[in-house]
Image: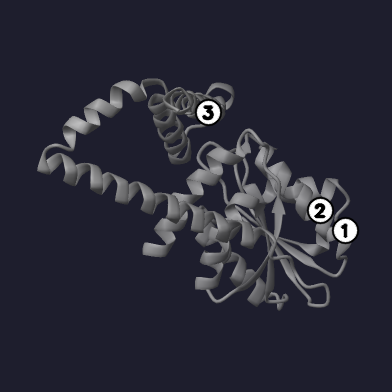
Amino acid sequence: MLKYKNHTIEIKRLIQVASGLVGFLFFFAPILLGGIFNIGTAAGLLGFGGLLAWGLFRPKILPWLQNVRETKKGRLFTSLFCVLFCGGLLLVTAESALMVRAVVNGPPEDVPVTVVVLGCRVRGTAPSKAMRQRLAAAEAFLRDRPDAVCVLSGGKGEDEEIAEADCMYRELTAAGIDPGRLYREDRSTSTRENFLFSQSIIKDNGLPETVVVVTNEYHQYRAGLIAKALGLTTYAISAPSGVGLLPTYWAREWFGILYEWIW
């Protein structure tokens, strides 16, 4: 019986080590391949690094924990850590469920809509990979809904040679989208400003006030929160992110959503 129990423990350790290593490498790859590091990357590295360390050094960690819990302060610390850890897991699970729900919130077919494409980084004068993903989703929707108009929203960053809106306009018109259907909002520097300035364009031009937001899937829920705070009714058309980048940006959104909930 003891032998069977020890065998089971070793299998669990191997699973923990393998899961921790794979997850750690998944979050480390964007740093190595694209120099991408954000709070989501840090959270992923910390979480999976902790799981990897637990699997590797569990026989040494457990006796140390037992010694710590023999003191009152140690019991308080470990209990607080467990509460915070479990609370964090519940929080990110709830956020992820809401994020998934936002992704599938597609627009109705019989309602006039204005598409709002949220800008992202321009590399010089060329769209980044994320922008190309959003433009592909916007182009497909505009071809499917020839009655829809579109606001391209994004200003010029310090490291960009042209405004994001101008880059998107150039790409969509080159793909054959009628320029008369496209409106450029080239002042915004944040998601909140994307919607605020796009809302002004919609009102000034008498465009449909039902908005279809085009952005990457991980960003849809937080974008919807911001739009709702401004009184906009929104639906989602999501651009798929690459498998290698999705975990990093998905984890980053957890912190962005929490910020929107609190502030």
Of labels 1 and 3, the one closer to you: 3
**Location of residue 7 with respect to 85 vertically, above or below:** above
Q: Which residue is mark 3?
A: 15
Percent of width and height locating residue 56: 41, 21
Q: Residues within 10 Å of mark 3 (few under 14, many from 20)?
A: some
**What kind of element bears circle 3?**
helix
**Mark closest to the chain's N terminus, 2 or 3:** 3
**What kind of element bears circle 2?**
helix
The answer to which image quadrant residue 204 occupies is bottom right
Is residue 9 rendered to the left or right of residue 19?
A: left
Is residue 74 rendered to the left or right of residue 247?
A: left
Q: Which residue is mark 1?
A: 143
Q: Which residue is mark 2?
A: 139
Q: Nearer the viewer, residue 214 or 51?
A: 51
Coloration of the structure image: one colour
Q: Which disc is residue 36 wearing?
A: none
Q: Residue at x 48, y 32 (%)?
A: 37
Q: Nearer the viewer, residue 25 or 260?
A: 25
Amino acid type, callout 1 = Arg
Q: Residue at x 57, y 51 (%)?
A: 155
**Location of residue 263 with respect to 240 vertically, above or below:** below
Amino acid type, callout 3 = Ile
**Location of residue 173 with respect to 263 vertically, above or below:** above
